[in-house]
Each structure stands twice: as structure tokens, then as C-alpha cells.
Amino acid sequence: MAQVVVRNVSKVHVSIKGEPLLALHGVSFQVEDNEFFSIVGPSGCGKTTLLNLLAGFEMPTRGELLVGGQTIREPGWERAVVFQEYALFPWYTVAQNVAYGLKRKRLPEPERRDVTDHYIGLVGLRGFEKRYPRDLSGGMRQRVSIARALAVNPSILLMDEPFASLDIQTREFMQDELLKIWQRERKTVIFVTHSIDEAIKLSDRVAIMTPRPGHIEEIKTVDSARPRDMTQPAMVQLAAEVKRWLRQQLFESTPA
Amino acid sequence: MSHIASGAPGDLTAPSRAAADHAALAGTLIPPPPPAWRRLARRLLHLWLLALFLVAWQAVSTLGTRINPQLDVMLPPPTAVFSAAQELIARGALLTHVMDSLRRVLVAVGVGAILGVPLGLAMGWSAGFRASVDPLLEFIRPIPPLAWIPLSILWFGIGDTQNEYIIFLAAFFPIVLNAMAGARDVDTYLVRAGLSLGARRRDLFLTVVLPASLPNIFTGLRVGLGIGWMALVAGELVAAPTGLGFMINNARTLFRSDYILLGMVLIGILGLILDFLMRQIAAIAMPWYRR
């Protein structure tokens, strides 16, 4: 029952100067139904490019990406995206932002209001429905963005470093909330981050990417029960192992 | 919807439950706004430089005539401009001039907006369309509105349409170029967010591109209105029977520099008022927007 299949994907970007750059090379992996799958790696390793391909914003140069056996050809609500910089519509209120996808799905008004209300409550923003994004803190904006993505009831949630610009307390709080939502709603989550701890804390499996060209070197399974305490020896050891391994890979691939 | 029933309501109500209470509390913590007369007084205090300017103008004109009697005609004092205004109001002419000029500028800028905003948005949205329209536009744009006067008389004859056409030419290009910049600079992430939430191209235009361009569209309308107003004198140069531009041109032949200055001052004041109104409309149209 593999839901997402990435098969031998390469992506060439063309720089401003016109030089071709190999962003991804020979990337293959598979994400199971309802799995929480993280992609971790340093900046510039191509993880955002990979997520853009999965979202359908860009097309691969070689290889293919499939969801439920169908090739990804364009963006769509069944693969909702949560962006690092939230990408909320500044001209819509919190409620209007959350209702945006539902309106595009032509959900009738009463149902739309119910669903919007439900997800605003789920992310703890009741009372802020009529605020504009500009009047919210970073953490609150990201919660709106998560509610907006969940409201369209996607089968896959694509998250691009969603908590990277939050302070550490808000970040941990949001991680716990995301896990609660994921356990309740049971969706496939593909989560991109540069934080190894975050990936291990949240995921069923963690794919480790190395840059130039972007490539998945290894996929680690984390089979400890949630919620995970990152100060536990097993977790600390796993994180240290991944860090050490990644550092080794980086030194090997970067000419001195 | 099945996914509504699937979960208990949020666990996270604590920070939001008190939102209304917090707003009420916040209201009691900040000092009450100063009374209206105080705010007005504070605003009037900002006009000290303008007042100083008027005083200096008056002094130069009245004291200067003692040294050079021609200054009476070269630079009549504010009081002379004021009595010229009284004189023209009494004859019932001034209101006609003002209203006719306002009507011409608003018609010209209105047509400029109706044609210019969609054109600019389309150019910003589609690179192909922009590439084909841009050369034509950039070729016409540097031609000064004044140069169009002879041809425009042939085309539109003598009358309001010809006057409005000259003003339109002045206002049109800033409106187009600003709308284009707005549609061009729409945040890629917002477009992508729209697409990933199921928006089609038409939805995307109405829900993302248009609102994202609104601040630039309003900038274009403000600049267009300002430049159109500046083009009034050129617009009313030929055979306009009324208007502030006509008044200035006509006063030149009559050697009435007080009328000329009155026309200039009125154009300045009305331009200021129009710009203020435009900003109010922008604030109402974009409650979410703060500079």
C-alpha cells in the first residue's frame, strides 16, 4: 500500500548566469500510507526542491513521482503544503484563510463554516477568526497555515521546515500539537527539516540527504513510542549517530 | 464531513478562550486617546512651515514693491490672490472653473484606470503578453502630452474630449506601469499556496493576483491622478471655455497675475484634497494593508 513513490528522480536547475545546476540526483524512496516521514539535511541539499516536486510546483528533469500509482503533474489539495514562511493571504482573515481551500472545493456554506471552525479550534485559535495574519505572532500564523492545509482534508501533508522560524518553546509546543493532530487525523506527512532532533522526535522514518548533488544517503527507522523524550539515552544516541554520520558525509563531499 | 466527527474539539483552547478578555484588558491598560480638539490642534501645529511661507510671500510682495514697483504684477501677495478669489466667486465664475476642471480630470483618470489597470495586470501576469505590449507602450510613453495637442484637435475637435484626452495621456502610463509591477511582484509562495489549495487560474487571479496588486494599483491611481491634475493646464490650453487651466491661460493674455496665482494655488489645494481622498479610499479598500 505504498502511497508515495519517488523513483530515480533528478532535477536540474538553471542558474541566473545560465549554468545548469544538479539539485537532485537519483533520488528514490517510498512513503507508506499514514507514515510520518522526515527528510533531513543541511541547507542547500535539495530538500525543498524535493518537496516542490512532490507538491507539483516543479517537474522532475528525470525520473517520476507517484501518489497512489498516479504521476504527480500539478499542485492539488490532496497534497496540501505548509510553507516555512506560512504563505498566508494577508488580505484574508484567519477564518477566510482557513476556508480558502474549502471554497475552491465548492463546499456549501454551512459545512464550510463548520469545517473552518473545527480546524481553527483544533489549532487553538478560537477568538482570532477575524484577525488579519499581520496581527498574529509567528507561531499563531504557522498554526493558521496548518489549519488551512488540514481543512481541505488532504491525504498527504507536505511540510517545508514549518517550525524553522519559531523560537524554541513555540517550536516544541507546535511539534507536540502536530503529533496530536497527526495521530487524530491519520495522514501521510512528509516533513522537511534541517533539525535532526526534530526529525527523530516526530518521524517513523528519517531520510538523510546530502548536498551537491542532493541525494538520499540513508533512511533510518525510529521505532520508539511517542511522545518521545529527546533526553532519553536511546534518542540521544540515535541523534548523535545521525549527526556524526552526516558530518562525515559532508566532509567527504566538500573539497577542502 | 467525516473528518469533522473524527476528533474531539481542540485541546488547545487555553490561549484563545481569553482572547476577548485580553482585548478588553488591553483597552484598559493603554491611555485613552486624546480629545479631538487636541488632535486637531496638534495637526495644525504641523502647518507652521506653510504659515511661515505665506507670511514670507506677503512680506516679499508688499515690501518689495517699494524697491521695484513691477513686483506688484510679477508677484502679487496672498491677500491679492484672496481678493481675486472673492471677486471671481462673486461673479460666479470660480466654482464653474473648479467643477469643470475636476470633472475633466476625473473622467480622464477614470478612463485611464478602466483601461490601464486591466492592461497592467495582464502585462504583469503574462510574460508573453508583456513582451508584445511593452515595446509599443515604451515607444508612446516618452512622447509628452503637449505634443499630442495638434493631432488631438484633429481627432476630437474642440471641446471636453480633447481636453480630457491630453489629461488621460498623462495619467495612463503611471497607472499601467504600477498595476503591472503589482501583478509581477506577487509572492511566488502565495501563488503556490493558492494552487496547492485547489485554486484554478481564474480563482488565482481574483483571490491572489488582484488583491496582492491592490497596493500598487492604488499607488498608480494616486500618481496618475496627481500627474493628470498637473497636466490640467496643458489639457485646457486649447479652446476650453472654462476650467482652472483655461483661467490661467486666459489671465496670461489679460496680464492678471493674481488670477494666475489663484489658479495655481487652487490646483495645489485641490490636488492635495484629491490625494487625501484617494488615500482614504485605499484604506477602506485594503483594511489589511499597513505601510
Image (cartoon, rainbow, N blue to C red):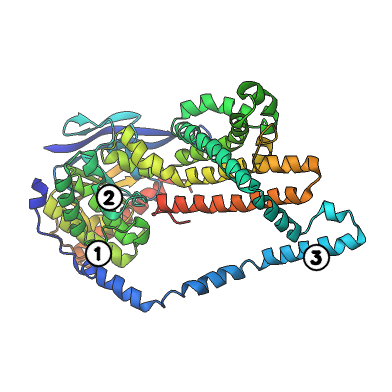
Subunit bearing disc 2: A
Q: CA distance from mark 3 to mark 1?
A: 70 Å
**Mark 2 nearby-residue class (10 Å; few <14, some 14–19, many ≥20):** many
Q: Nearer the viewer, residue A222 or A113?
A: A113
The location of residue B138, given as percent across then percent down, is 60, 29
Q: Residue furthest right?
A: B67
Q: Nearer the viewer, mark 3 or mark 1?
A: 3
In terms of depth relative to the viewer, which is nearer, B134 or A252? Answer: B134
B228, above or below A87, in the image: above
Residue corresponding to mark 2? A96
Amino acid of disc 1:
Phe
What is the three-letter code of the residue carrying label 2?
Gln
A90 in relation to A216, above or below:
below
Coordinates of residue B254 in the picture (x, y in percent): 80, 42
Numbered mark located on residue B59 in the image: 3
Circle 3 marks a residue in which chain? B
- For residue A10, above or below residue B261: above
Question: Which residue is the site of mark 1?
Answer: A173
Per the image, label 1 sits on a secondary structure element best described as helix
